[in-house]
Image (cartoon, rainbow, N blue to C red):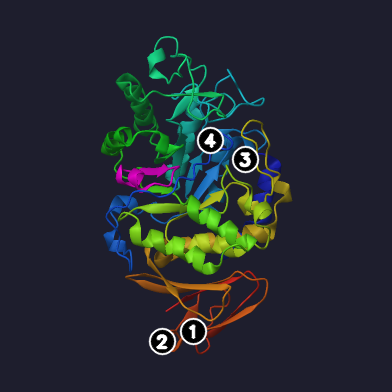
């Protein structure tokens, strides 16, 4: 199936800029970090300390896509047809929200939640076929791109076909009825991880897509609801097949990183960012979250950072545009993995329903917003210090400006972000002023005696 003509027209309008920069609704789990572990070097995470199999995803942007919202047809083939546009934009890793058949018993809305999975080993007809998915992965790999699947290991649909044959594989309430621990998730039933056969079945589902379809990673829905003694051996077995497999946990808990996940969600920073936008906390409060992670996260592990995802309101609506710009710039210049949710790059303000098809109107995309994210993607992908460097704050006498250094063995950068609605002039200390900084953004001019000006909600990056 050919991609929608409006969608292609949107990319055509933005082609010139390419030349310049060559789980259920309400399912957000904001669990605080509990377990600390072996820490990374506080000063710098150098490239040579990262395992070779981690290099393809370490610090790289991640693009989340919901097929029902991505195009009017909502098909895998529409995504395959646009891989070149994604590559040109600087997107190389795509996480696809669940594309499995979903249940009918207790279904929410006309289409049902993609997180109410009825068959882990197939593709829902609304999205395409197994052959379509195989072609997507093949075409992505030919372009040096990666494809991740969203896996739901905590629960299934209420009408999973094996329920009658193996009722003990699922959770039951005190009355003996199939049930779930979160009452609002009425369209699903939890798996019973006290049952070894259920564990084995779910392991087979994870192995299937890696072994038979060569997927490059999994985003695991509400991963903290699944026991770590399931994850650890299964992840080890998955990596026997694919050593560079990327595992992202939808949870905020270092114990999952210690169980084998490469990255987890930084919900704490997300909520702190919006608290700052509302004026209830200052930049020092933001930095305490960032610095706390820098000093405690297990070595070689990452936090995924975002200003929106499918569980949250659109950032252009929640933070406002252009007010969201400094927060997005921060996400793309900090350590970790920055997330871009499909439609965010168009300035979309409507959060798509998980239960109904609500395609994005790409013809209404804002070119200014798109260019902003293209620039951030180009800067992120093109600078090793942003991908893998250490992070240290630099004190300045401007209360609404955040300045920090990112440094790896081959590069040192200075990042300055203005969170205010007024232009800001920043002067570095004598030590910083004596460094020969040259701007990477804008016209590439050298810094003038340690002083520079930041536009409203703007940012600049300087290289030594």
Which of the two residues, 51 or 83, is positioned nearer the viewer here?
51
Q: Residues within 10 Å of mark 3 (few under 14, many from 20)?
A: many
The first of marks 2 and 3 along the sequence is 3
| Tag nearer the camera, 3 or 4 | 4
Q: Is residue 249 magenta?
A: yes
Quadrant of the frame with the N terminus: top right
SS for dot 4: loop
The residue to which callout 1 is attached is 428
Q: Residues within 10 Å of mark 2 (few under 14, many from 20)?
A: few
**In which quarter of the view is residue 78 placed?**
top right
Q: Residue placed at 32% from the left, 62% from the top?
A: 47
Residue 261, can we see it?
Answer: no
Which of the two residues, 448 or 173, is positioned nearer the viewer here?
173
Q: Residue placed at 42% from the left, 61% from the top?
A: 335
Mark 3 → mark 1, Cα distance in angstroms: 44 Å
Mark 4 → mark 1, Cα distance in angstroms: 45 Å
The residue to which callout 4 is attached is 23
The residue to which callout 3 is attached is 70
The first of marks 2 and 4 along the sequence is 4
Q: Is residue 388 above or below residue 397?
A: above
Say whether marks 1 and 2 touch (CB < 8 Å): yes
Mark 3 → mark 4, Cα distance in angstroms: 17 Å
Q: Residue placed at 64% from the left, 71% from the top?
A: 420
Q: For the view shown, which residue lies furthest in the front direction?
A: 174
The residue to which callout 2 is attached is 431
């Amino acid at each position: 199936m050919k991609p929608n003509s409006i969608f292609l027209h949107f990319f055509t309008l933005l082609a010139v800029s390419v030349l310049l920069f060559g789980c259920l609704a309400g399912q957000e789990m904001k669990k605080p970090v509990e377990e600390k572990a072996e820490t990374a070097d506080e000063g710098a995470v150098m490239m040579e300390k990262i395992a070779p199999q981690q290099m393809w995803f370490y610090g790289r942007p991640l693009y989340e896509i919901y097929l029902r919202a991505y195009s009017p047809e909502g098909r895998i083939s529409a995504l395959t047809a646009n891989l070149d546009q994604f590559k040109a934009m600087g997107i190389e890793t795509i996480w696809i929200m669940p594309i499995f058949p979903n249940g009918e018993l207790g279904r929410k809305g006309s289409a049902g939640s993609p997180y109410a999975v009825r068959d882990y080993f197939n593709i829902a007809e609304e999205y395409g076929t197994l052959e379509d998915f195989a072609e997507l992965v093949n075409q992505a790999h030919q372009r040096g791109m990666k494809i991740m699947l969203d896996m739901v290991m905590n629960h299934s649909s209420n009408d999973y076909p094996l329920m009658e044959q193996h009722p003990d594989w699922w959770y039951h309430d005190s009355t003996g009825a199939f049930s779930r621990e979160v009452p609002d998730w009425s369209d699903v039933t939890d798996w019973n991880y006290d049952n070894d056969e259920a564990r084995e079945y779910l392991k087979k589902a994870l192995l299937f897509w890696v072994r038979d379809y060569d997927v490059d990673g999994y985003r695991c829905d509400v991963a903290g609801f699944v026991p770590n003694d399931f994850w650890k051996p299964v992840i080890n077995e998955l990596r026997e097949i694919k050593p560079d497999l990327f595992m992202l946990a939808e949870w905020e808990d270092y114990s999952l990183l210690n169980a084998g996940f490469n990255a987890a969600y930084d919900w704490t920073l997300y909520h702190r960012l919006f608290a700052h936008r509302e004026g209830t906390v200052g930049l020092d409060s933001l930095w305490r979250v960032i610095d706390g992670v820098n000093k405690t996260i297990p070595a070689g592990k990452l936090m995924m950072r975002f200003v929106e995802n499918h569980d949250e309101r659109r950032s252009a609506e929640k933070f406002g545009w252009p007010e969201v710009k400094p927060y997005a710039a921060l996400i793309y210049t900090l350590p970790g993995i920055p997330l871009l949710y499909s439609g965010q790059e168009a300035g979309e303000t409507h959060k798509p329903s998980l239960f109904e098809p609500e395609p994005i109107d790409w013809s209404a995309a804002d070119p200014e917003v798109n260019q902003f994210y293209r620039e951030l993607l180009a800067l992120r992908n093109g600078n090793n210090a942003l991908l893998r460097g250490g992070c240290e704050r630099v004190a300045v006498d401007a209360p609404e400006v955040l300045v920090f250094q990112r440094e790896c063995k081959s590069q040192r950068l200075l990042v300055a972000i203005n969170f205010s609605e007024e232009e800001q002039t920043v002067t570095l200390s004598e030590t910083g002023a004596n460094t020969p900084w040259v701007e990477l953004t804008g016209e590439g001019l050298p810094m003038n005696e340690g002083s520079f000006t930041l536009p409203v909600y703007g940012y600049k990056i300087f290289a030594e």
